Each structure stands twice: as structure tokens, then as C-alpha cells.
Amino acid sequence: MLCTKLGITLQYLRMFAPNRTVNPFVFYSSWITMVLCTVFYIITTILTVYACSPREKIWNKLLVGGKCLNYRGIILSTAIFNIASDVAILMLPVHTVWNLRIPRKKKIAICFLFGTGSLACVASTMRAVYTMRIIEGGEKADVSYNSLRTALWSYTESTLGVIVACIISFPKLWKAKGGRLSAFVSQGAKKLGLRSSPQSSDDQLPQLSEIQLPAEDLKKLDSAQS
């Protein structure tokens, strides 16, 4: 998840804050988010790998002696951080997008694209719920059942994160390659005897390359480049 979150945040920087004078809020917030995510995930990975001393006690519960960290605390803190960071990354571009000089309909469409990340927040929350059931249940917990649910929600969260990262750049890809795809689809439709009705320009997916920053940000960018 770290690489996915870093990729999404770097795209925010490229689109909305190429330097700190254009959009200071997005610039500093994005960098703070990336630093916090990197530090947190590195620390939790180390704590998970070396949770017990000797390490054999992690998988061999019958081993006499040794000690382990509070694994419940690690799991709970990781779940809380995942949810908080997902929400923070989700909300970062909203204010900037709403101030763009584009039609309101396209603003809503772009916010909807970014809003698909809320599904990852739901998946992260559900994973935390089933993980805590295993920990709180102790020896009586149905580990096989709850572990399966935890794994499924973990895969869902990772998959949705990658999808969100790709959706952000999809309009630019469509603008570059959409003509060929449309021609291919049209040829296939003709062979099948089908006709596609033309769509109005208002119904097309908004192109992120057409985004214009607010006037104040444009002035800051011009002054920074000069």
C-alpha cells in the first residue's frame, strides 16, 4: 500500500502543485503525507518481523521462554493509520478541484474520480474489523474464517488503491489513445451491423490535461518561473 499511496500523492503534486508557490497547501500536505506514510510503514514492518524474541516464537506458540511485543497494538495502530491516511489522501485535491476554472459538471466528474478512493477506506475498515475479531477472540476465535475475510479485504484494498491511481491518469491516456480505440470499436460495430449514437461533448470524460489552475495560482507560477 505504501507504493500505491506514494504514487497517488505524487500525481497530486504533478497536477496541482508542481512547485510550492503554485499551491502551498497541496504541496506541503502531499509531502507531509508521503513522509509520514513512508516512516510509519517502515517502522511497522520492522516491528512485525521482529515482534518476538526469539523470532521462532512468532509461529511456534509452544516455545518455552521468550517474549513478544503487543501484537494487538501493532495491528490496531496500523488499521487506524491506514484509514486516516486513506481519508487524508482522498480529501487532498477536493478544494483545489472545486476552484478550477472549468464547468461545474466537470468538477463533479473529477471529484467523483478521486472519490472512488473512498471504497479503499471501506475495505481498510472491514479488514481492521475482522483482524480485531481474531485478536480479541483469542484461542476461541475462528481463525480460519476470520483470516479468510481479512485476506479478502486486504486484497480488495490493494486492488482499489491501484485502480484509483490508474483512474487519475486515465483521461490523459484516453486522449492519447482514445482515437485508435474508437476507430477499432467502430470497425467492429460495422462488421456486426451495429451503429453507435454520437455522444455530446458534455457527456465525455473530463480531460485532466484541460484543467486550468485558478488565476491566483497561475500568477504565482509565472512569478516563480520568471
Image (cartoon, rainbow, N blue to C red):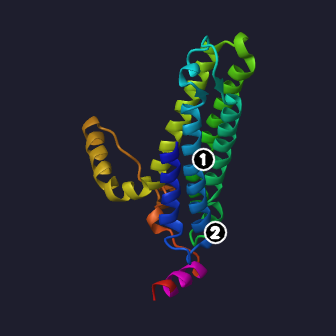
| Residue drawn at point x = 30 percent, y = 40 percent | 189
Q: Quadrant of residue 128?
A: top right
Q: Could you tell me which secondary element the residue under label 1 belongs to?
A: helix
Camera-side residue: 46 or 4? 46
Residue 82 painted magenta:
no
At label 1, counting other C-alpha atoms closer than 10 Å, the crowd grade (few under 14, some 14-19, many 20 or more) is some
Does residue 213 show up? yes
Does residue 103 show up? no
Q: Horizontally, is 18 left or right of 84 in the view? A: left
| Residue drawn at point x = 52 percent, y = 72 percent | 212
Name the N-terminal-most of marks 1 and 2: 2
Q: Quadrant of residue 188?
A: top left
Which segment did they paint magenta?
Answer: 216-223
Which residue is most to the right?
136
Q: Magenta region's main secondary structure? A: helix
* Residue type highlighted by circle 2: Phe
Q: Is residue 222 above or below residue 34?
A: below
At label 2, counting other C-alpha atoms closer than 10 Å, the crowd grade (few under 14, some 14-19, many 20 or more) is some
Q: Could you tell me which secondary element the residue under label 2 belongs to?
A: helix
| Residue drawn at point x = 48 percent, y = 49 percent | 165
Q: Which residue is mark 2?
A: 25
Q: Which residue is mark 1?
A: 40
| Residue drawn at point x = 58 percent, y = 29 percent | 153
Q: Horizontally, is 43 left or right of 176 in the view? A: right
- Percent from the top left, x then y, of residue 71? 67, 29
The total number of labels drawn is 2
- Percent from the top left, x then y, of residue 85? 64, 49
* Residue type highlighted by circle 1: Phe
- Percent from the top left, x then y, of residue 207? 46, 61
Mark 1 and mark 2: Cα distance apart in space: 22 Å
Camera-side residue: 95 or 80? 80
